[in-house]
């Protein structure tokens, strides 16, 4: 017998799951559009060489590769892959459609991505990302705009206890150099430091040592990269950077982002955090991550990636983006009971019953009238006993049953039964929809 469960790390979404996802996606998309971001979609499958080399060594290992097909299948080689994120596809789109897209392109994209990762709480192999990006400007206005949009999206969903951690890749580079880490080991150090909030200083120290970064360099790094909650942390970091021009420029950039964001919904939520590393290799400037208190990991993150589009186009095009993790948002909202109580949890507002199979055409006519009134209507398909039909409606949480027997058909009426209190009233068929809508409003 074939197995019925989905593949590990993948999930089926039952009706309640889908409604919750659609609710969250709808909120996020509406907020993004209020900030002038436009929708974009890209294929699930990309050419393998489009994705490889964009995420660092660890990211490359998590790409789901697709074997060559047909006569090439036996070779075991791959030429395609499921997309790993939505940022690299955006860069490819910018390069391919440069003539059709505006110089400043603000886009949002909400689609699934795939990673051959180890499943865990809130971590799956197939999951949605909710990306928002600004391409074509180096101004810190872009970073502040992104922080404002994601902050407003989360507050609209009901989150109140999140913080946006902010750091800068060039500042990280300067701090790594100041700690005495060899340039060739910078990537290794960042991968380890990116886990500071997950495995703690002792765990990072062990990982640094395993990656060939120990002794005084490791000690200095853990001193530099302690989390902070104050903007004055920039003054401390400036002292570590010394007279390194690139590091000082990064500090100035972070100050500008903080100042701009103070006039937006992100104001008061941004924290300078030198321990934030974010391991993806394409980041070049400011990096950001959103955290809530009771979730190991983040609700999303992003940063500036000024060189990525140029890898496809051969010219410099600056860009910055932020990605919210839909799955983690759904997990936290479910655990906290954050979904609206009036979020639809039933398949219909009213069920039309069928007394006799020969009367089904009349049931469809009534159902059409009720739908035209704006109601969600389910027609019961079988002419079973009325008690069984009502029991089905009650079990599905459908609040009203429209009863259509021979007398109602002859008189052009319909009897509407409210299951909550077992009361019923008879209406002209043309008036039944308005009566049910009014009852639903009073009930809500």
Image (cartoon, rainbow, N blue to C red):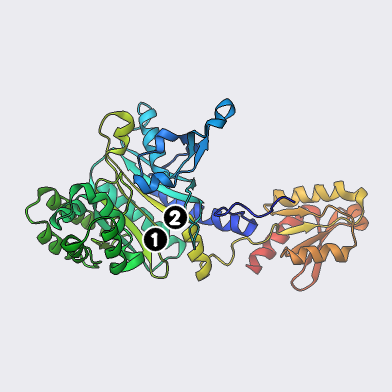
Judge whether residue 268 can be spotted in this image: no
Please state the horizontal and vertical placement of residue 154, each as a whole percent of the image. Answer: 42, 60
Image point (48%, 56%), residue name: 118
Please state the horizontal and vertical placement of residue 5, each as a whole percent of the image. Answer: 65, 55
Q: Residue furthest left?
A: 243
- Element assignment for label 2: strand
Please state the horizontal and vertical placement of residue 384, each as a whole percent of the image. Answer: 89, 59
Q: Earlier in the sequence, mark 2 or mark 1?
A: 1
Residue in the foreground of this view, choosing between 219 and 151: 219
The residue to which callout 1 is attached is: 298
The residue to which callout 2 is attached is: 325
The picture quadrant where one finds residue 103 is top left
Please state the horizontal and vertical placement of residue 236, each as a whole percent of the image. Answer: 13, 64
Residue in the foreground of this view, choosing between 356 and 144: 144
Residue in the foreground of this view, choosing between 245 and 409: 245
Q: Are marks 2 and 1 in contact (CB under 8 Å)?
A: yes
């Amino acid at each position: 017998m074939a197995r019925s469960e989905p593949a590990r790390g993948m999930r089926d979404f039952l009706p309640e799951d889908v409604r919750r996802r659609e609710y969250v996606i709808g909120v996020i998309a509406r907020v993004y559009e209020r900030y002038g971001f436009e929708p974009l979609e890209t294929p699930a499958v990309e050419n393998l060489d489009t994705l490889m080399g964009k995420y660092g060594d660890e990211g490359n290992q998590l790409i789901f590769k697709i074997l060559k097909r047909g006569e090439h299948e036996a070779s075991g080689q791959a030429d395609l892959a499921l997309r790993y994120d939505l940022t690299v596809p955006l860069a490819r789109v910018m390069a391919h459609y440069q003539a059709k897209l505006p110089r400043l392109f603000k886009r949002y994209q909400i689609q699934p991505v795939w990673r051959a990762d180890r499943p865990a709480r809130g971590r799956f192999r197939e999951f949605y990302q909710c990306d928002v990006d600004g391409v074509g400007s180096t101004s810190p206005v872009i970073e502040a705009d992104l922080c404002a949009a994601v902050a407003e999206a989360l507050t609209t969903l009901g989150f109140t206890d999140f913080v946006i951690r902010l750091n800068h890749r060039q500042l990280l580079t300067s701090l790594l150099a100041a700690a005495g880490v060899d340039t060739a080991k910078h990537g290794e150090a960042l991968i380890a430091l990116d886990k500071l909030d997950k495995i703690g200083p002792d765990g990072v120290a062990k990982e640094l040592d395993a990656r060939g970064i120990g002794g005084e360099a490791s000690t200095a790094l853990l001193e530099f990269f302690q989390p902070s909650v104050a903007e004055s942390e920039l003054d401390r970091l400036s002292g570590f950077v010394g007279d390194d021009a690139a590091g000082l420029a990064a500090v100035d950039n972070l100050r500008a982002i903080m100042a701009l964001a103070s006039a937006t919904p992100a104001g008061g939520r941004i924290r300078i955090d030198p321990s934030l590393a974010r391991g993806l290799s394409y980041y070049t400037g400011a990096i950001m991550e959103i955290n809530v208190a009771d979730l190991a990991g983040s609700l999303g993150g992003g940063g500036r990636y000024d060189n990525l589009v140029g890898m496809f186009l051969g010219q410099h095009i600056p860009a910055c983006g932020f990605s919210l993790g839909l799955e983690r948002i759904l997990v936290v909202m479910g655990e906290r009971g954050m979904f609206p109580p009036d979020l639809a949890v039933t398949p219909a507002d009213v069920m039309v019953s069928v007394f006799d199979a020969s009367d089904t055409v009349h049931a469809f006519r009534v159902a059409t009238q009720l739908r035209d009134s704006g109601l969600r209507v389910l027609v019961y398909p079988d002419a079973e006993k009325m008690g069984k039909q009502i029991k089905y409606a009650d079990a599905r949480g459908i609040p009203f049953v429209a009863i259509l027997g021979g007398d109602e058909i002859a008189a052009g009426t319909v009897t509407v039964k409210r299951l909550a209190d077992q009361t019923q009233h008879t209406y002209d068929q043309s008036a039944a929809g308005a009566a049910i809508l009014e009852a639903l409003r009073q009930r809500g």
